[in-house]
Amino acid sequence: MPARGFGTPTPAGKAARYLLLALVLLLTIGPFLWQLSTSLKGPGEDVYSRVPAFLPEDPTFSNYARVAETIPVWTYAANSLTVAAVAVFGNAVGATLAGFALARLRFRGVRLVTGLFLATLVLPGEVTIVSQYVTVRSLGLTDTLTGVALPGALAMLNVLLMYTAFQAVPPDLDAAALVDGANVWQRLVHVGLPNVRGMLSVVVIFTFIGAWDDFLWPLIVLNDPDRYTLTVGLQYLNGTFTANPRLIAAGTMIAFIPIVIVFASLQRFFFKGVEEGAIKG
């Protein structure tokens, strides 16, 4: 019998690990699959039975069509996409520039600015939501998509993430580029960005998810139903069809599909950016 190396798990240990992974997978993917199954069930199937069936007996897409007939779901989706696009653009550009400035440029008060950024993370969003609303109202941006997108256009956490990513780039690369006559912009584009694309992908993905899923802030700012974002607009399904969870599940899946598309499109760039960002001696 071959001897196992130090730290090699036993067969029982491997089985326990796989069992734990299967349990985590079930807890993570299970609710999503259940919502998908409910959205595909026909009107003749009982979703409240004592022993509900996971697989639909008669799968149908009519629930999705009824959602579109009940609420202007595509208008709400376009509004959410507009808000998310502004948030992603603001964070991708603003966090990159601010992170590079804090990590690579030397100016008086850089430590104070970094400390203020860190201090903002201590305050929960509910503490600043009143001041945000007063600011948006004073700018005349209430009941507008601009007012919804503006507070999330630059997150301090994303600035610190990009700051950390730029800090991990060896200073010798910047010094070599400086000797070659590169200015600040050239150092950012040709030296900094190629090594932080992984972190930039993380910022883009989570900013999009946060802006797309946000419910409280759009509910506070918006009054006109035509300007509602998708998460706010879907509440009409819950209020009108409380006895029909099929439509609620279908609306939830419609809101979930863009997140899947964005994540599936950018995850390869995330891993590729991490791989290319590794500095080899």
Image (cartoon, rainbow, N blue to C red):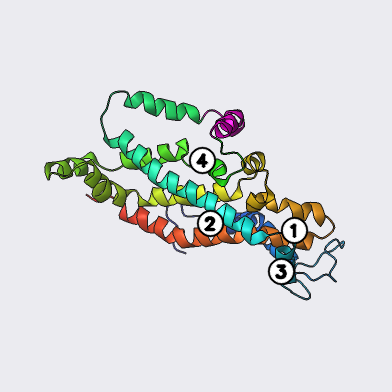
Mark 2 or 1 closer to N-term? Answer: 2
Q: In this orientation, which residue lies closer to the viewer: 231 or 118?
A: 231
* Residue linked to disc 2: 10
The quarter of the picture where residue 2 lies is bottom left
Indicate the amino acid at tag 2: Thr
Residue 248, labelled with which disc? 1
Between the residue at mark 4 and the residue at mark 2, the CA separation in whole angstroms equals 54 Å
Q: Decide whether residue 133 is among the magenta residues.
A: yes
Residue 150, labelled with which disc? 4
Indicate the amino acid at tag 1: Ile
Q: Decide whether residue 237 is among the magenta residues.
A: no
Mark 4 or 2 closer to N-term? Answer: 2
Would you call the spot at circle 4 few (<14 residues within 10 Å), some (14-19), or many (20 or more)?
Answer: some
Q: Residue furthest left?
A: 180
Between the residue at mark 3 and the residue at mark 4, the CA separation in whole angstroms equals 33 Å
Q: In this orientation, which residue lies closer to the viewer: 11 or 33?
A: 33
Disc 4 or disc 2, which is closer to the eye? 4
Residue 269 in picture, x, y percent from top left? 40, 59
* Residue linked to disc 3: 65
Would you call the spot at circle 2 few (<14 residues within 10 Å), some (14-19), or many (20 or more)?
Answer: few
The residue stretch that appears in magenta:
122-139
Residue 90 in picture, x, y percent from top left? 44, 45
Between the residue at mark 1 and the residue at mark 4, the CA separation in whole angstroms equals 29 Å
Asked if 165 appears above or below 251 in the picture, the reply is above
Indicate the amino acid at tag 4: Leu
The residue that appears at 37% across and 58% down in the rendered structure is: 272
Residue 266 in picture, x, y percent from top left? 45, 59
